[in-house]
Image (spheres, helix red, strand yellow):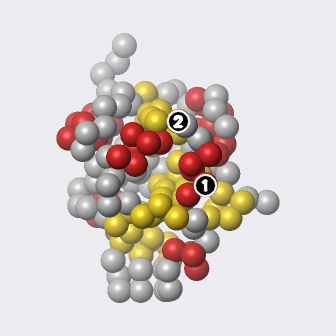
Amino acid sequence: MSEMHSTALRFQERAQAAGLDVRPQELSESTRTAVEAADAVGCELGQIVKSVVLQDAGGELLLCLCAGDRRIDLARVGDGVAMARGREVKEQTGYAIGGIPPLGHDRLLHTVVDGSLRRFQTVWCAAGTPNAVFEVRLDDLLAAMPDADVRDIAARLD
């Protein structure tokens, strides 16, 4: 068995420091998109947690966790919210787009969680790289993010 990628290992250590004991899995298939991830792990599309970094009107970054079968409605998140640029995302979180985990970033980000994720007991999240994922009970994930704002921020994909 090969050694875990250093970025996934860093995520695992940070998750454990937050009280979340998870074991990232590195897959040969890409998990960069929600569809790819659901296919790779064999779960429902909605169980994939998309980690999307946005920028508010004041220039602050915030993280939105959205079910894989939904899309974030920027107006529901807040006024003047827009997608953050890839370089800023990497600089602020320590992770590249396509592998951003729900916690364990280089700096603390305000996090908004799509309430539709409550449909699932377990969910799958990125673990720092486009090929690393982890499965977690949603309640355990939310407990590791006590300041997260859980509310309806997404619409169904059509």
Residue depicted at x 51% and y 74%: 77
Q: Secondary structure at mark 1?
A: helix
Q: Residue at x 41, y 86 (%)?
A: 57
* Residue 135 position (above or below residue 153): above
Please say whether residue 10 is visible from this viewpoint. Answer: no
Residue 59 makes an appearance in the image: yes
Q: Which residue in the structure is indicated by mark 2?
A: 122
Closer to the camera, 115 or 43? 115
In the rendered structure, the answer to whether residue 28 lies left or right of residue 44 reads left
Residue 75: x and y, percent? 58, 79
Mark 1 residue type: Ser
Does 87 appear above or below 99? below
Q: Which residue is mark 1?
A: 116
The x, y position of residue 127, in whole percent, is: 39, 40
Q: Which residue in the rendered view is the most extreme toward the top?
A: 1
Which quarter of the figure has residue 11? Answer: top left
Q: Quadrant of residue 43?
A: top right
